[in-house]
Image: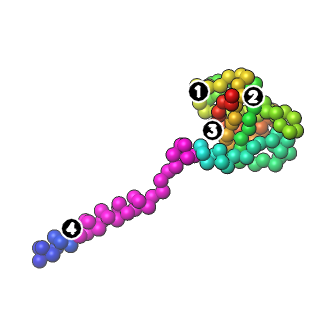
Amino acid sequence: MKKYVAILGLAALIGCSQDTSASDNNKEEKPSPQDLEDQLREEAIPLEFAFVNAGEVEGGEKVSIQGTISAEETSDQGTVYTVTTKEESGYGTYTVEKEDEDAEYTVQDIVEVYGKYRGMDDAGTPVIEGRIIEGIK
C-alpha cells in the first residue's frame, strides 16, 4: 500500500512540475528594445505642421519628423530640443523631449526623430516625446 501512495505522490509531483514548465512556455515573451524601436519606425507617420495645427493629429500617435536642431536645453529630467523642419507647406517648429541626461546632439545637427505626439504646449508648439533621435549626415 505504501508503494502505491509513494507512486501516486511521485506522479503528482511530476505532473505539477510539468504544468509549471508548460505555463512558462505559454507566457508571452517581452519584445526586445530593438524590436520596439523597429516597430516604432514602421508605425510612425511623418508629421506635417499644417496637419498638427488643423487638429488632425491625435495625442499618443506614433510620429516622425526630420529637421535641424535650432535650440537645446538640458536638465536633470532630460534634454529638450527645438527642431525646425522644412515641409511642403513651409517650415514647422517642434519641441522634442528626450528623457536622457547626456545630450548627443547639438544646435545645427540634422536629426530624424521618432516618438509619440503629446499635443501642443502653452506656446502652441507641437510636443513630441522623442524615443529615437538619429543624426543624419
Q: Is residue 6 above or below residue 98?
A: below
Q: Earlier in the sequence, mark 1 or mark 3?
A: 1
Say if mark 4 contacts mark 1, CB within 8 Å: no
Q: Is residue 49 above or below residue 11?
A: above
The residue that label 1 is drawn on is 101
Image quarter (top left, top right, bottom left or bottom right) of the C terminus: top right
The residue that label 4 is drawn on is 10
Look at label 3 and name its amino acid: Arg
Residue 20 belongs to magenta span: yes
The residue that label 2 is drawn on is 68
Residue at the top extreme, as displayed: 107
Residue 70 belongs to magenta span: no
| Residue at 71% in and 38% down | 128
Q: Earlier in the sequence, mark 4 or mark 1?
A: 4
Q: Nearer the viewer, residue 54 or 36?
A: 36
At label 1, counting other C-alpha atoms closer than 10 Å, the crowd grade (few under 14, some 14-19, many 20 or more) is: few
Mark 4 or 3: in front is 3
| Residue at 83% in and 45% down | 51
